[in-house]
Image: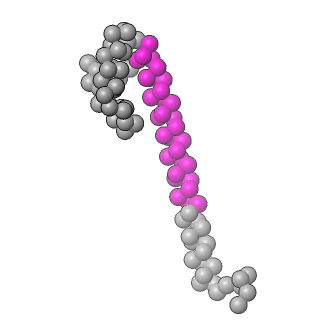
């Protein structure tokens, strides 16, 4: 049987799967956009906090990170008074 002529049931399944994949791709693209935006916001906040912190505070913070490598999934672990709201 040639590849160009498939049973109608297969075409229906193929079309449904292609639609589902396209839909999932759009959802993932939106999630990526949101994460990039959130990352940019956090980078701006981090820069601002660094400029507002005293050299002593920065040194103390760096000494907390030195014994262990900073893990990307633990940004909220440093206990700063008043939280991180800007």
Q: Residue at x 64, y 86 (%)?
A: 7
- Please report the bounds of the magenta region as a residue range: 22-51
Who is closer to the viewer here, 9 or 54?
54
What scheme was used to colour the molecule?
Answer: one colour
Who is closer to the viewer here, 49 or 10?
49
The quadrant in which residue 45 appears is top left
Q: In this rendering, does residue 83 appear at all? A: no
Relative to 56, residue 1 above or below: below
Residue 4 horizontal side relative to residue 24, left or right: right
Does residue 25 show up magenta in the picture? yes
Residue 17 position in % (x across, y down): 56, 70
Q: Count the marks: how many?
A: 0
Q: Which residue lies most toward the front here? A: 67
Relative to 82, residue 15 above or below: below
Report the predominant secondary structure element of the magenta stretch: helix
Residue 23 position in % (x across, y down): 55, 59
Q: Residue at x 40, y 11 (%)?
A: 52
Residue 24 position in % (x across, y down): 53, 58
Residue 64 position in % (x across, y down): 30, 23
Q: Looking at the rendering, in which quadrant would you find the C terminus?
A: top left
Q: In this rendering, does residue 65 appear at all? A: yes
Does residue 48 show up magenta in the picture? yes
Q: Which residue lies most toward the bottom here? A: 1
Q: Residue at x 60, y 81 (%)?
A: 10
Residue 75 horizontal side relative to residue 12, left or right: left
Who is closer to the viewer here, 3 or 10?
3
Q: Looking at the rendering, in which quadrant would you find the N terminus?
A: bottom right
Q: Residue at x 29, y 30 (%)?
A: 77
């Amino acid at each position: 049987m040639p590849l160009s002529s498939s049973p109608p049931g297969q075409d229906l399944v193929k079309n449904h799967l292609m639609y589902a994949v396209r839909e999932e791709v759009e959802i993932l693209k939106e999630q990526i956009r949101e994460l990039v935006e959130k990352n940019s916001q956090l980078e701006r906040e981090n820069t601002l906090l660094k400029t507002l912190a005293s050299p002593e505070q920065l040194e103390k913070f760096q000494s907390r990170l030195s014994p262990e490598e900073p893990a990307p999934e633990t940004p909220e672990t440093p206990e700063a008074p008043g939280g991180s709201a800007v």
